[in-house]
Amino acid sequence: MFSNNQTYIPQQNDNDNTGMLIDIRDFMKTCKCKVMLIINKLEIIKYLFKEFHKIDYIRIYQIGKKKITSFCIL
């Protein structure tokens, strides 16, 4: 998931993905399988998934060589 999805074709009519984050968190609390989620490191993400946070993941974009720290949730 990427919080800035202005360049993506919308998959739904609504641009608010916050409900999906809560659904993912609730699923991770009850599932018996392993789940990995890499997402932008935002304060709300850190709060929602604090019990699942394991490491930070650094992405480097090829064109601009910009480094972005993402939140890796296991």
Image (cartoon, rainbow, N blue to C red):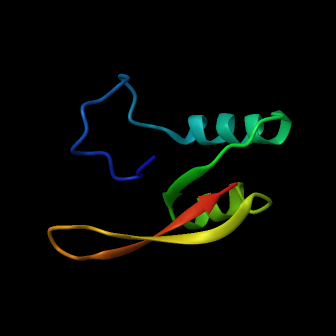
- Seen in the picture, residue 46 relative to 7 is either above or below; the reply is below
Residue in the picture at 24% in, 31% down: 9
**Quarter occupied by residue 16:** top left
Check the image and name the residue furthest to the front.
Answer: 34
Place residue 6 in its image quadrant.
top left
- Locate residue 48, reporting x and y percent: 70, 55
In-image side of 52 versus 20 (left or right): right
Q: Nearer the viewer, residue 33 or 56?
A: 33
Percent from the top left, x then y, of residue 30?
A: 85, 35
Vertical position of residue 56 compared to residue 72: above or below: below
Whole-percent x, y for residue 69 in the image: 46, 73
Question: Relative to 49, does residue 71 appear above or below in the rendering?
Answer: below
Q: Is residue 68 left or right of residue 27?
A: left
Query: How many badges with numbers are in the image?
Result: 0
**Residue at image coords 60%, 42%:** 21
Q: Is residue 12 left or right of residue 35?
A: left
Instruction: Indicate left or right for 36 with 51 as reference.
Output: left
Residue at x 20% of width, y 67% of height: 62
The residue at 53%/55% (across/down) is: 38
Residue situated in front as seen by the camera: 60 or 50: 60
Q: Residue 42: percent from the left, percent from the top? A: 53, 65
Quarter of the image for the C terminus: give it.
Answer: bottom right
Please identify the quarter of the rendering in which residue 14 is found: top left
